[in-house]
Amino acid sequence: MEKNQIVELEITDLSYEAMGVAHYEGLTVFVNNALPGETVKAKILKVKKRFAFAKIEKILKESPDRINVKLNQWVQTGLASLAHIKYDKQLEFKRNQVVNLLKKAHLDGVKVNETLPSPEQTGYRNKAQVPVREVNGQLEIGFFRRHSHDLVPLTNFFTTDPEIDRVLVATRDILRKYEVPAYDEIHHKGEVRYLDVRRSKANGKLMVILVCLHKDFPQLPKVAAEISQIPEISSVILNYNPKKTNVILGRNDYVVLGEDHLIDKIGDVEFRISPKSFFQINSLQTPRLYDLAIKKADLKANDVVVDAYSGIGTIGLSVAKHVKAVRGMETIREAVEDANANAKLNGIENAQYVTGKAEDVMPRWASEGLKTDVIFVDPPRKGLTPEFINAAAATKPKRIVYISCNPATQIRDLQLLQEKGYHFDEISPVDMFPQTPHVESVTVLERTEE
Ligand SMILES: C[S@@+](CC[C@H](N)C(=O)[O-])C[C@H]1O[C@@H](n2cnc3c(N)ncnc32)[C@H](O)[C@@H]1O
């Protein structure tokens, strides 16, 4: 097999990145946007020792699960790389990811529930971070084509709240009007690198963050004044990112106009959200995710609860009024300040959050003799560390509720927790990110020994 060769392939499976999988002359071939059950004529793009990558030239036999996406860019860019698959099949795909990972870990006996569907399947994101670049002599917003930094200009981001799309386009037009240069990644010059827009589902207010190469630029006062005139905008913030890096946000934020935070709500609890703080992006599905996790926790009035990897305290503060005490930790200082302010905002006096890495804070608490009843963990994709797991187990919780955005690391950690005397028998996938391959899953571990 060689590059540019055209081959006919039968797609038999879907990879965890949602690429069609075929076999040809002993090689596994990953075909962009192809679906199981399809036969395609494909062009080989890259050949490695054991596998190859290809793209569809023509679909010879089409899957009944295929949706013909109007804007193929969504699939191309990787922004919504499941958009060509019917929604019920997307849910099945996500459940299968968990089933396959359990099989690989020899945990076939664990039950995997049906994926909990999202109430909204498009336009569900309450936040967008979109790159700004010059394309054909004009400032554009869009999305990077998969595995590249080629900007595909877009104005409808499909999975984001349409109100956010409206503000992104209006901001783009203001930047064009005042001839603000887009960031030029190759020469590390220009000005605006990203637009980061968040919207509160509770009150409709929006925060616009201009991620810039400099702390200030000549057109900033006029640009900010005009952005603040867009209906429902409550903050215009400049994030200063002077580094040559792929990391989107720089360390410092400067409020140019308006508030330094947004207010949103989950259930009955109000949350202030600072620009750097993590907040679940699917506003309607988040309370359903938390309800599931909290139900599994089976909390009692006398329980001491830990909210680990807490963000702005959304899980801990949702349960604080029903338990004795909540303690939480999180690395982002601003998020911890938000969490403690959110306790006050909601009249909660038994919750306390500290800044620090979970793997440092939990051992400290354990060595101070903390005893816990329930620990919620909701780590980033890399999952927990052995230091955290040892210390968490040493505080002897009855239950550990594990919310994960990466079932591979979740299953790895569940096995480590099993060795510490914890047992789990089911995992529930929850669709927080429709149209994308991301899988969120929740499970509860019970202590088996005294
Ligand atoms: C998936 S978010 C969950 C936040 C929160 N539980 C929620 O539902 O909104 C993970 C959080 O962990 C924080 N984080 C990342 N690494 C951490 C670490 N080593 N220790 C503590 N927190 C960490 C991130 O800043 C982020 O706020």
Image (cartoon, rainbow, N blue to C red):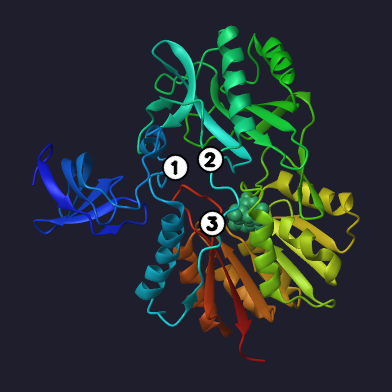
Quadrant of the frame with the C terminus: bottom right
Q: Residue at x 25, y 56 (%)?
A: 37
In the depicted structure, whether residue 425 falls above or below residue 450: above
Residue 155 appears at what percent x and percent y? 51, 25
Distance from the alpha carbon under mark 2 to that under mark 1: 7 Å
Between 154 and 35, the one nearer to me in the picture? 35
Mark 1 sits near ligand 1, with its Cβ under 8 Å away: no
Which circle marks residue 431 in the picture?
3
- Please tell me in which quadrant of the rendered image residue 231 appears: top right
Q: Residues within 10 Å of mark 3 (few under 14, many from 20)?
A: many
Specify the amino acid type for callout 1. Answer: Ala
| Disc with the residue nearer the chain's start (2 vs 1) | 1
Identify the residue at image location x=71%, y=12%: 221
- Per the rendering, the mark at residue 159 is 2
* Residue at which label 1 appears: 80
N-terminal-most mark, 2 or 3: 2
